[in-house]
Image: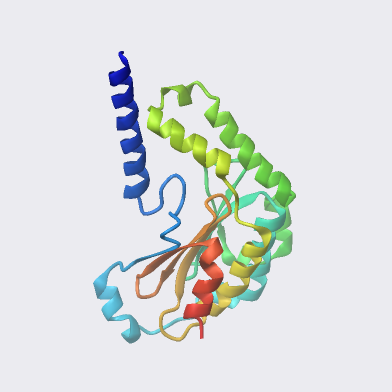
């Protein structure tokens, strides 16, 4: 290839990289700086009938206090890096650094029991868990499979790996302590929530079928703006 062809190829790769990052709601690098909070409206039929639907106490509501303490323990002191709480079903999904390609599913009532947590989730110091995440991505970046990835994706991955910072321990505590408040809202209350240390963000769905995707950094402001 001559110099002009090389320059054109690099320009094409740059355009592809920008397009990939711009098109996704949450891209490989997370939420963009200009989009610290994204709202998705969802099913209009659910929005229009929200206030007409009777509210019921779920399995999660019955054990909320103990459950939140257990989930905070999982994120701060054990192997879990992502949690999904399904308030209506009582389903709790967890992802562990020891088996990052799978999800486990647990019942809320069982997770509220400290003895159950002790049996199912090995202790891992928070700093060691974060380092393990860096190591896992380092292995991917040096693998033979990664050599087959297009150039623009290699740059996205490398930039993300170099600048990546996880959700902090204080952010995790703030989120966990607010979950019950959002669940107890009288009208538009929380239906499910996903908290991910790796992506440093929170995804929430409400009973009106609306979805909010918020950066951990902007979460406190969201609470102040929306909680009574």
In the drawing, does residue 127 fall left or right of residue 160? Answer: right
Please state the horizontal and vertical placement of residue 182, each as a whole percent of the image.
Answer: 51, 77
Residue 98 visible in the shown view: no
In the drawing, does residue 3 fall left or right of residue 87? Answer: left
Q: Pick the residue in front: 10 or 222.
A: 10
Q: How is the image coloured?
A: rainbow
Q: Residue at x 41, y 27 (%)?
A: 149
| Quarter of the image that includes the N terminus | top left
In the drawing, does residue 52 fall left or right of residue 195? Answer: left
Position of 151 relative to 220 (above/below)? above
Q: Residue at x 46, y 46 (%)?
A: 29
Q: Residue at x 45, y 86 (%)?
A: 186
Position of 160 relative to 104 (above/below)? above
Residue 54 visible in the shown view: yes
Please state the horizontal and vertical placement of residue 94, each as a whole percent of the image.
Answer: 56, 53
Q: Pick the residue in front: 168 or 13.
A: 13
Q: Residue at x 57, y 45 (%)?
A: 164
Specify the farthest residue to the left.
Answer: 45
Q: Quadrant of residue 153?
A: top left
Position of 42 relative to 49 (above/below)? above
């Amino acid at each position: 290839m001559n110099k002009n062809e090389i320059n054109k190829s690099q320009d094409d790769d740059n355009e592809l990289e920008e397009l990939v990052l711009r098109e996704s709601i949450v891209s490989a690098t997370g939420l963009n700086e200009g989009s610290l909070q994204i709202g998705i409206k969802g099913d209009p039929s659910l929005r229009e009938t929200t206030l007409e639907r009777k509210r019921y106490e779920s399995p999660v509501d019955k054990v909320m206090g103990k459950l939140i303490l257990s989930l905070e323990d999982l994120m701060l002191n054990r192997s879990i890096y992502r949690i999904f709480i399904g308030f209506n079903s009582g389903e709790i999904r967890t992802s562990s650094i020891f088996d990052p390609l799978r999800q486990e599913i647990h019942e809320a009532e069982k997770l509220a029991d400290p003895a159950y947590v002790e049996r199912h989730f090995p202790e891992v110091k928070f700093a060691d868990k974060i380092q393990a995440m860096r190591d896992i991505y380092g292995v991917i970046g040096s693998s033979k499979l990664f050599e087959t990835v297009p150039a623009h994706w290699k740059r996205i991955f490398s930039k993300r790996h170099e600048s990546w910072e996880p959700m902090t321990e204080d952010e995790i505590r703030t989120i966990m302590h607010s979950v019950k408040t959002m669940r107890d809202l009288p009208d538009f209350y929380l239906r499910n929530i996903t908290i991910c240390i790796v992506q440093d963000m929170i995804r929430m769905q409400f009973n009106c079928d609306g979805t909010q995707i918020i950066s951990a950094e902007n979460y406190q402001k969201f609470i102040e703006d929306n909680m009574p």
